Image: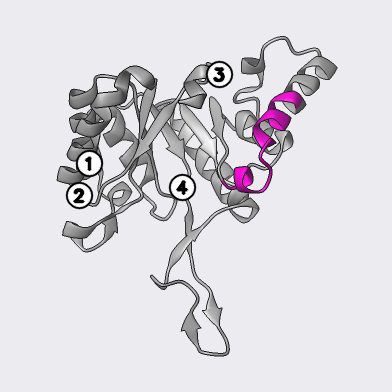
């Protein structure tokens, strides 16, 4: 793998439609676990056996999936939670109980679009996931709320396109950040974010970026 040759650490993200499929995918991931440092479980997927409700909305299922994955892989597991339900704290606590070592917050927000000529939804599944800059305020609020509970370290994500965006997530309590949509627009966005943060730290005479985590003044 090119990433390995460059010395890049890899976190593998997996998902499934039910507990059994998560187990199967985790078992397949076991074949490459020497090449990854952690596995992220996308718990925003709909559980087809429970009426399509996302796993994040069912703390019991969250605990089972996390626990099962931990037992199969025996490497750090990160639980990625959906912002579309109100029980994020309960889901986070269930993930911790199952053995997760961190949380990814947030995944996409439910949205839709309509074609006004045909009066049909623009998305084949009617509803879909909204990402990008529009979700950043929601993501910041969710990260802030969860980090205040001090359940697990949080990887903040959702609408990060610049080093300033990344810095906001750190200030509200995220221990790290993730970038998704921006990578499809700026291939070197990760490099720019790192360089921007380094310059900011130098300008402010801050010697450790961890000093910024949770520095929000309220």
Q: Which residues are magenta?
A: 181-195
Q: Residue furthest right?
A: 203
Quarter location, residue 207: top right
Q: Which mark is residue 93?
A: none
SS at circle 4: loop
Q: Nearer the viewer, mark 4 or mark 2?
A: 2
Task: State which quarter of the image contains the N terminus.
Answer: top left
Query: Rounded to the nearest whole Å, what is the CA distance between mark 4 and mark 3?
Result: 28 Å
Q: Which mark is residue 6?
A: 3
**Sequence-first tag of 1 and 4:** 1
**Sequence-first tag of 2 and 3:** 3
List x then y, in percent, for residue 147. Answer: 49, 31
**Sequence-first tag of 4 and 2:** 2
List x then y, in percent, for residue 14. Answer: 33, 39
**Sequence-first tag of 3 and 1:** 3
Query: Rounded to the nearest whole Å, what is the CA distance between mark 2 and mark 3?
Result: 35 Å
Could you tell me if residue 218 is visible in this image? no
Residue picked out by circle 2 = 18
107 vs 157, left or right, is left
SS at circle 2: loop
Q: Which mark is residue 107?
A: 4
In-front residue for pair 154/71: 71
């Amino acid at each position: 793998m090119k990433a390995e040759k460059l010395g890049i650490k890899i976190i593998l993200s997996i998902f499934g439609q039910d507990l059994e499929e998560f187990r199967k995918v985790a078992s397949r991931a076991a074949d490459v676990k020497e090449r990854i440092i952690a596995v992220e479980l996308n718990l925003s997927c709909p559980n087809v056996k429970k009426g399509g409700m996302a796993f994040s909305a069912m703390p019991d299922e969250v605990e089972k999936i996390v626990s099962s994955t931990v037992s199969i892989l025996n490497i750090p597991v990160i639980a990625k939670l959906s912002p579309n339900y109100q029980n994020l704290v309960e889901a986070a606590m269930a993930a911790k109980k199952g053995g997760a070592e961190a949380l990814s917050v947030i995944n996409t927000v439910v949205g839709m679009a309509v074609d006004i000529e045909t009066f049909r939804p623009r998305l084949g599944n009617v509803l879909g996931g909204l990402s990008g800059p529009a979700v950043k305020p929601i993501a910041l609020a969710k990260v802030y709320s969860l980090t205040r509970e001090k359940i697990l370290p949080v990887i903040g994500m959702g609408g990060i396109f610049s080093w300033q965006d990344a810095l906001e997530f750190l200030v509200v309590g995220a221990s790290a950040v993730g970038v998704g949509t921006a990578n499809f627009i700026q291939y070197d966005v990760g490099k720019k974010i790192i360089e921007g943060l380094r310059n900011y730290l130098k300008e402010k005479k801050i010697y450790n970026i961890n000093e910024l985590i949770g520095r929000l003044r309220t």
